[in-house]
Structures are given as structure tokens and as C-alpha cells.
Amino acid sequence: MNDAPPGRPAGHFTLLGVTFDTRLTLLLIFCTLVPMLDYYGHSPTGSKAWDRFLFYFVGSALFIWTVYREPLSAFGLRRGEWRRGLLYTVAACALIAPVLYFVARGPDMQAFYTEKAAGGLGRVILLNGVELFGWEFIWRGLALFAFARAFGPGAAIFLQAVPFAFMHLGKPEVETLSTIFGGAAFGLIAWRTQSMIYPWLIHWFVVTLTLLVATGTI
């Protein structure tokens, strides 16, 4: 096993003759266990949105500080290339809106999102922003930028989209099937802007418009 400074994981470790990258191994374990805790209903705050903010944002931040020992800005929590980011955000929302207006009117989408909005539409939209900030930080922040170091940005963009897609299981099929491509598109935008802020804004817009259309509000 390689030597390392006190309190810092070694660069690599060997188990039964196989060498593992310590940080990458811990990252994969973290990115597997956290969605499982979410799925099985562990609720330290009593609110799904705030639980997810705690698991995905706060948990990821603690992981970065303890395992990578770097600022969160190194993993996309920054303004980045903001002019490009705003351009991508406006363009993506404009392109997505007509498609969503058609898709969100399907019976499965209407049934799912009408139930979701039962707690009050405005409150749900606000809490979605909180929840999605955590989702974007773990996938388009921590996972994307860490995987890019190990495998390059091309592979990282699709790798981070895989767990993101699986997290949509249980939602309407048409939405779930699109998420490997949507997640990759979000990853590409995050990489090009060096920020997870713009995918978060786009994702929040997508969910908000879907709610408004599916519930017949617009």
C-alpha cells in the first residue's frame, strides 16, 4: 500500500493482487450508497426535498472536503464561463419547451405530476429547486469532474448520466427513457461552462414547466 500524509487517503491500495485508485473507489461507493439511502426512505429532515439536499449536496461537499481536500469550486460549484452558461440555458429552455408541452400532456405524466403537486404547486416548485440543486451537484459536480480526471470528459459525461437515469425509475416511462440523454446533455453543458449552475437552472425549468403543463395550469 502506498504511503500518504496523515488523514489523507493513499493514492492507491492493493487487494488480492488488484490495485485500486483510493479516491475513485471511495467515489463509486459514495455515489452508489447515497441514492440507496434516498430510495429506502431515510429521512433525517422529514422533507424529501431537504433530505435530498442533505444527502446529495451536503454529503457531496463533505466527501470533497475529506477525500479530495479541494474547494467545491473545483467540482463545478462556481459561476464558470457565465456568458456561455446563460446562452446555453436560454437556448436549451427554448428548445425543450415545445417538446415538454406535448409530452407533459400525456396521461401518465398528468397522473404522476398532479399527485406530486398535491402539496401546493408553488411550494412544490420551490422545493424542486432545493432538491435539484443537490441532484445536480452530485452528478454534474462531484461525479462529472472526478470521473473526468480518471477517464477524460467524454466518458465522464455519460458515466455520470447512468446513475442519474436510474434515479428516475418509478417516474413515467417516457421521462425515464430520456434521462440518459438528458443527463449527458446536462453533463456536457456543465463541462463546457465548468459549472453545475446552468444544468441546475435548465433542470429546474424542465421540472417546473412539466408540472405546470401536466397539472393543466398552462
Image (cartoon, rainbow, N blue to C red):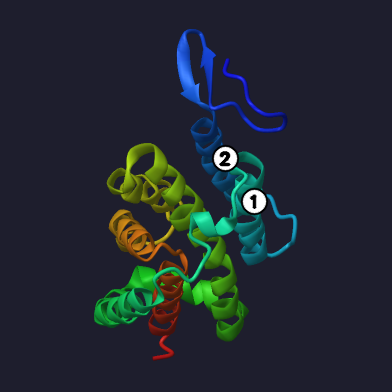
Which three-letter amino acid code belongs to the residue tagged 2?
Phe
Is 159 in front, or is 121?
159
Q: Answer few, some or many: residues within 10 Å of disc 2's Cα (few below 14, many 20 plus, some between 14 and 19).
A: some
| Residue occupied by mark 1 | 59
Query: Which residue lies most toward the bottom here?
Result: 218
Q: Which mark is residue 30?
A: 2
Label whose residue precedes the other's in the sequence (2 or 1): 2
Q: Residue at x 33, y 75 (%)?
A: 84
Q: Position of residue 162 (x, y in %)?
A: 37, 46
Picture quarter with the N terminus: top right
Please determine whether, in this image, residue 109 is positioned above or below residue 15. Answer: below
Please determine whether, in this image, residue 112 is positioned above or below residue 157. Answer: below
Q: Residue at x 30, y 43 (%)?
A: 155
Q: Position of residue 13 (x, y in %)?
A: 54, 19
Q: Secondary structure at mark 2?
A: helix
Q: Secondary structure at mark 1?
A: helix
Is 122 in front, or is 13?
13
Q: Which mark is residue 136?
A: none
Please determine whether, in this image, residue 47 is positioned above or below residue 33. Answer: below
Q: Position of residue 31 (x, y in %)?
A: 52, 43
Picture quarter with the C terminus: bottom left
* Left or right of 181 in this view: 162: right
Which three-letter amino acid code belongs to the residue tagged 1?
Gly
Q: Residue 44 occupies which quadrant of the picture?
A: bottom right
Q: Position of residue 81 (x, y in %)?
A: 39, 71
Task: Tell me how many marks there are.
Answer: 2
Q: Answer few, some or many: residues within 10 Å of disc 1's Cα (few below 14, many 20 plus, some between 14 and 19).
A: some
Q: Are marks 2 and 1 in contact (CB under 8 Å)?
A: yes
Q: Residue at x 68, y 50 (%)?
A: 42
Q: Residue at x 43, y 90 (%)?
A: 217
